[in-house]
Each structure stands twice: as structure tokens, then as C-alpha cells.
Image: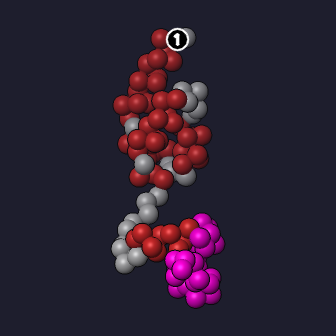
Amino acid sequence: MSNILDQIKYEELSVDMQDLSRVIGLKNVTKLIEEYGGSHFYVPKISKFKKFILRVIEENGELSTRKISKLFNVSEQFLRINFKKQFEIRARVKKMLS
């Protein structure tokens, strides 16, 4: 017999699981239920992935603070406060290369 969760229908899911199903699909929701059923976890905004933002800043020296802020849907102030050192290094490198 296959996994009982394979038999669940979209309309039988709770509202929040239906929302999730619209984004990742019913099959993936059933996998989440199987693996993490009963658990509670936080899904952070992209601004919480600071290592990722740092890598994008470092790998895209030509992008302005404004363009980076739009990529991550954060304010320029957020970037300047949280990545001040990286922007200072970028500015020094640009100055040296000019």
C-alpha cells in the first residue's frame, strides 16, 4: 500500500496548507507533512540570508546600492547598516582602479 498521504486531496488540506500547496504543489506539501508534521518553523524573509546578500554584493561590484536593495526588496539604509564594511571595501577598490 502506498503512503496514506498520497490520497489526500487539496480541498482536504487546512487553509494554510492549501496556500502552501498553491506555491509548491500538493506532492511537496504531503512530503512536508510526512517529514515535519506537528513541527513549527519560521520561514524568514530573504533579508535574513545575510551570507547570500554578502555574496551578491561581493560578486556584483558594478551594482549600485539602489539596485541591490531592489533585488532583495530591502531599503538602501538596511544595506548600508548591515553591510557597511563590504561597501567601504568596494568603494576603496573602485577608487584604486580609477
- Which amino acid does the dot numbered 1 rest on? Leu
Name the one closer to the observer, 80 or 55.
55
Judge whether residue 17 can be spotted in this image: no
Name the one closer to the observer, 91 or 38.
38
User: Which residue is at 57% across, 33% downward?
Assistant: 64
Name the one closer to the observer, 67 or 33.
33
Q: Label 1, on which residue?
A: 97
User: Which residue is at 59% across, 47% downward?
Assistant: 70
The segment highlighted magenta reads 1-27
Asked if residue 58 is among those painted magenta in the image, a careful observer would answer no
Name the one closer to the observer, 84 or 49.
49
User: Which residue is at 52% across, 85% downward?
Assistant: 14
Give the percent coordinates (x, y) of residue 45: 47, 58
- Image quadrant occupied by the N terminus: bottom right
Q: Is residue 92 above or below residue 7?
A: above
Give the percent coordinates (x, y) of residue 90: 46, 24
Residue 36 located left or right of residue 57: left
For numbered disc 1, what is the local secondary structure? helix
User: Which residue is at 52% across, 11% downward?
Assistant: 97
Give the percent coordinates (x, y) of residue 35: 42, 69
